[in-house]
Structures are given as C-alpha cells and as structure tokens.
Image (cartoon, grey):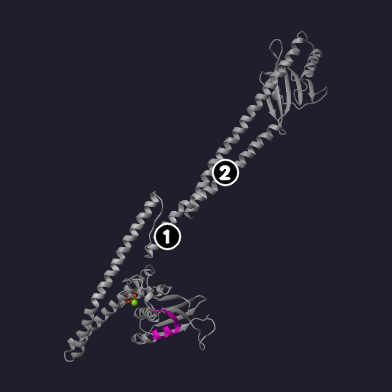
C-alpha cells in the first residue's frame, strides 16, 4: 500500500471513529435533555391542574358518599377537561371516576390504563409512559384535606411535535456529520498529497543517484525534509565529484600509458621476429607480445569508455544502419575465433517481421554509429565464444518489433548466477565462474554505454550451466 493511501486511511479511520463517538454522545444527550424538558413541562402542567382540583375538593370538604365523590370528580373534570387530549380522574381504589376526551366529558368510555402509573401516583409520586404513537400518559396524585392521596389525576398529551423537533435536530446533526466527513476526506487527501510530494522528490533523487545521474536536489522548506534534501544534494555532489575524479584519473593514466605501451609492443614484436634460435626466448617474446596486445586492448577500451564519460555525443557520426547486415559482418569477423573452439555461429531473423524490403529479406534498421555498434555486438559474440564449451552453438537473432530493433546473442555456455546478472554490466566486474577465460570485465559495460548512447538498452538473461542470452534493444530508425 502506498504511503499516501495509508496516511489517508489512518487519518480517516481515526477521524470518523472519534467523530462517530461524538455524534453518539450528542445523540444521547439530545434524548436525555429532551425528556427532562418534557417532564418539566408536564410537572408544571400537573401542578396547575392539581391546584384546580384541590379548589373543587375544598368546596366539598364534607362529602363522603360515593355518589357525591363522583359528583366532585365530574365538577373537577368540567374545569380540567380541556387540559389534555384526554383527562381522567381515579379514586384511591384505581377506579375511573371521570373521563374527558378532546374536551368532552364521556360517561362510559374505556380508557387505556397504565396501572403501574396509577399505583405510583397513589404512592405519592408522579409517573408517565410514552406510547409508540407518541402519546404521553402522565399520572399525578391529588391529596384530600387529610393529606391522603385520595385521587389520581391523569392526562394524555400528544408529544409527537417533540419527536419531530428531535428528528430535525438529528437530521441537522447527521447532515453536519456527512459534511464533516467529506471535508475530512478532502483535507486528508490534501495533507497526504502535500506530505508525500517532497518524499517523492527525494525518492526520485535517490533513484536517479542509483543510475549515477547526480542532479541537484532542493526543497523550498526549512524543516527536517528540507534538511534531508540538502544532505542528499551534498551527498550527490560529492559522489559525482568523486566518480568524475576517478574517471578522469583512469582516463589520464590510460593516455599516459598509451605511448610507452606502443613502444613496448613495438620492441616485443621486434624481439619476437628477430629471435629464431633460442626457442625459450622465442616463447617469452611471444608471451610479451601477447600480453602487450592485451594491455593495448584494455587501454583502448578504457579510452573508449572515458570518451563516453565526457558525454561527447556530438562527435559521433550516426546514420541509419541495417542491423542484420552489421550482425553478418561481425559474425564473419568472429568466425575464426569461434572455429578455434569448433563453435558454430548462426544468424536468424525472427518470424514476425514485416514485408521484405530488399530481396526476400526485410530491413531491420536503427540510427547508430556502425563502428561502435559492431564493437558492441562483437563484445557480446566474444563473450559467447569465451564462456562456451567446444562444439557448442551460438545463435544471433535479429528482430523488428513495431517500434524497436532487437538483437539477441544466445549461447549454451557456463551461464551467470542470478545474483550477478545486474553486476556483470558494471565496469571491471567479472562473475565468480569467469576464470575459465581471460578478460578485464569491461566488454559488457562498453556494450551498455554504446547501446545507451543510441537510446537503447541491454537485457541479460542466463541460467547457470545452461547458457546466456544477451539482448540489445534499439529504437527503430
Ligand atoms: N555469454 C556469457 N556467458 C557467461 N558469462 C558471461 C557472458 N557474458 C558475460 N559474462 C560474465 O560477465 C562478465 C563481464 O563481461 P565482460 O564482457 O564485461 O567482461 P569480460 O568478458 O570478463 O572481459 P572483457 O570483455 O573486458 O575482455 C564476465 O566476466 C562473465 O563473468
Ligand atoms: Mg567480454
């Protein structure tokens, strides 16, 4: 998972979680305070009604029989009938004494009774129940002249308006929460983008450093990331200077060695050709000549590499070159060397090429300098011969894809271990199993430099003990 994605997800998770907890708490608080408000209002209403009831009771202090009690209840109802959707009066035996519905006194109605509320009221405290259709049944005790809870006054109130209000508050709350989450998501994306932007710059810098491209790194900020960028920039500059110095040093030494080496080679040849009697000396001179040849080749390769290092692409003569033709030439030059080991080199053109242009062969062209390109292909064929057993096969394949030209050199030699595939393209690197042949470890790196100079690349595939395929890919001309 990308760093930015992880950052956004973490940020969102914790924000939504904490916001969820806040919303839950607010929702609960709304519920709680709403009921407190309702309760307070109902108590106030019950107090007022109780006062009216007590007034009626005071006027009929002396009445005791049941008929009269009913009469009192009726009188009280007359006064209170409009105080609720329904108004009821019970006696101390939980018997309904009177009932009024929508302001009209009803004699034989059968109301819904919450007995527990009535009992609670008879015990001296108020009680209420809210039904599913938002009707509130509120029961409160009424005391007689002896301070006994002789009656229960109950009224029914429609509190659905209160629920509508609470739903509205909740709606606003949730709409706000939705907006907040959108805002949080956008801000976390913004934060993640701003946080990873400098990291991407640093990452790009390290990636180009690893390709030995030491570009300047600078972040316009004064924090730790800015300091890291400055440190990286300094490191890059120092590495660049060091590598340039090293390359310059090798180049200078190679130059300096060229003249004395030419003299050594000349004298060795002179000695070799002049010595016909002493077989031992003849052998030594031959060896001297061979080694000075090897050194000359090495110096020439180093000088070629230093030419590339100086980035002198302007000097190169580049022209549209028929690659298969070039491969045929290189193969014929290398034929003698291959014959020494009884190795057969065959050249093949891959099948899926387009219409033939010349005769029955299609053109596979790339814009290259043919001398350098021959050198690169020759290096690959040289390796294939060097690192293969006698009597094996080397196949050079050319192919034209819609936009590229591919040259593959395939052998059945000793192969390269998987962990060394990358390294063999480095200068002076020789694989652990390379001691079967002489070499300085420069051939492949020269090949790589040449191919890259023409905007191509090299790919190395190999299986230890089975063979190697090295592929050159160039843009098509
Ligand atoms: N076809 C191949 N089969 C097996 N190993 C190979 C092959 N080509 C290259 N290598 C490995 O890659 C290393 C680097 O190759 P490179 O051509 O750069 O150097 P070299 O052949 O050792 O010396 P030079 O080419 O400079 O004379 C070799 O030493 C060898 O270990
Ligand atoms: Mg080589």
Res. 411 in view: no
Look at the image and give the residue range highlighted in magenta.
317-331
Between the C-alphas of marks 2 and 1, the distance is: 35 Å
Beta carbon of the mark 1 residue lies under 8 A of ligand 1: no
Residue 256, x across and y down, in percent: 23, 75
| Residue at mark 2 | 180
Q: Nearer the viewer, residue 16 or 467?
A: 16
Q: Residues within 10 Å of mark 1 (few under 14, many from 20)?
A: few
Res. 62 in view: yes
Find out whether residue 458 is within the magenta segment: no
Q: Quarter of the image holding residue 393? A: bottom left
| Residue at mark 1 | 204
Residue 143, x across and y down, in percent: 70, 14
- Say which label, 2 or 1, has the lower sequence index: 2
Q: Secondary structure at mark 1?
A: helix
Above or below, comparing residue 276 to residue 265 in the picture = below
Q: Nearer the viewer, residue 290 or 240?
A: 240
Above or below, comparing residue 135 to residue 17 in the picture = above
> Ligand 2 is found in which quarter of the picture?
bottom left
Q: Magenta: predominant secondary structure element?
A: helix
Above or below, comparing residue 115 to residue 65 in the picture = below
């Amino acid at each position: 998972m990308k760093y930015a994605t992880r950052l956004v997800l973490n940020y969102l998770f914790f924000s939504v979680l904490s916001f969820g907890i806040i919303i839950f708490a607010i929702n609960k608080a709304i519920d709680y305070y709403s009921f407190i408000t309702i309760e307070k209002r109902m108590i106030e209403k019950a107090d007022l009604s109780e006062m009216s009831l007590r007034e009626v009771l005071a006027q009929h202090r002396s009445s005791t029989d049941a008929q009269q009690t009913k009469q009192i209840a009726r009188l009280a109802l007359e006064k209170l009938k409009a105080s609720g959707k329904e108004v009821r009066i019970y006696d101390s035996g939980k018997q309904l004494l009177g009932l009024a519905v929508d302001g009209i006194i009803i004699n034989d109605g059968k109301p819904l009774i919450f007995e527990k509320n009535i009992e609670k009221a008879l015990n001296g405290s108020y009680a209420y129940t809210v039904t599913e259709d938002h009707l509130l049944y509120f029961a409160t005790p009424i005391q007689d002249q002896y301070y006994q809870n002789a009656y229960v006054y109950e009224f029914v109130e429609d509190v659905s308006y209160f629920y509508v209000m609470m739903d509205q508050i909740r709606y606003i709350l949730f709409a706000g929460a939705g907006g907040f989450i959108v805002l949080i998501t956008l801000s976390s994306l913004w934060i993640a983008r701003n946080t990873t932007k400098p990291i991407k710059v640093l990452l790009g810098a390290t990636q180009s450093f690893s390709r030995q491209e030491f570009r300047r790194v600078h972040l316009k900020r004064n924090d730790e990331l800015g300091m890291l960028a400055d440190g990286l920039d300094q490191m890059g500059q120092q590495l660049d200077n060091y590598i340039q110095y090293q390359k310059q040093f090798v180049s200078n030494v190679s130059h300096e060695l060229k003249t004395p080496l030419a003299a050594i080679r000349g004298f060795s040849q002179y000695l070799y050709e002049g010595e016909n009697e002493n077989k031992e000396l003849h052998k030594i001179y031959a060896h001297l000549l061979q080694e000075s040849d090897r050194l000359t080749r090495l110096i020439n390769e180093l000088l070629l590499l230093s030419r590339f290092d100086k980035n002198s692409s302007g000097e190169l003569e580049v022209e549209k070159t028929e690659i298969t033709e070039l491969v045929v030439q290189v193969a014929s030059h290398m034929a003698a060397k291959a014959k020494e080991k009884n190795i057969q080199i065959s050249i093949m053109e891959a099948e899926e090429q387009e219409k033939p242009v010349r005769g029955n062969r299609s053109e596979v062209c790339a814009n290259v300098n043919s001398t350098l390109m021959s050198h690169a292909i020759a290096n690959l064929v040289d390796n294939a011969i060097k690192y293969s057993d006698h009597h094996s096969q080397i196949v050079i394949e050319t192919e034209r894809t819609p936009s590229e030209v591919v040259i593959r050199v395939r052998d059945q030699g000793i192969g390269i271990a998987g962990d060394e595939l990358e390294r063999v393209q480095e200068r002076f690197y020789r694989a652990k199993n390379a001691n079967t042949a002489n070499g300085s470890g420069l051939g492949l790196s020269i090949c790589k430099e040449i191919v890259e100079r023409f905007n191509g690349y090299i790919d190395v595939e190999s299986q230890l003990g089975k063979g190697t395929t090295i592929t050159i890919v160039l843009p098509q001309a």
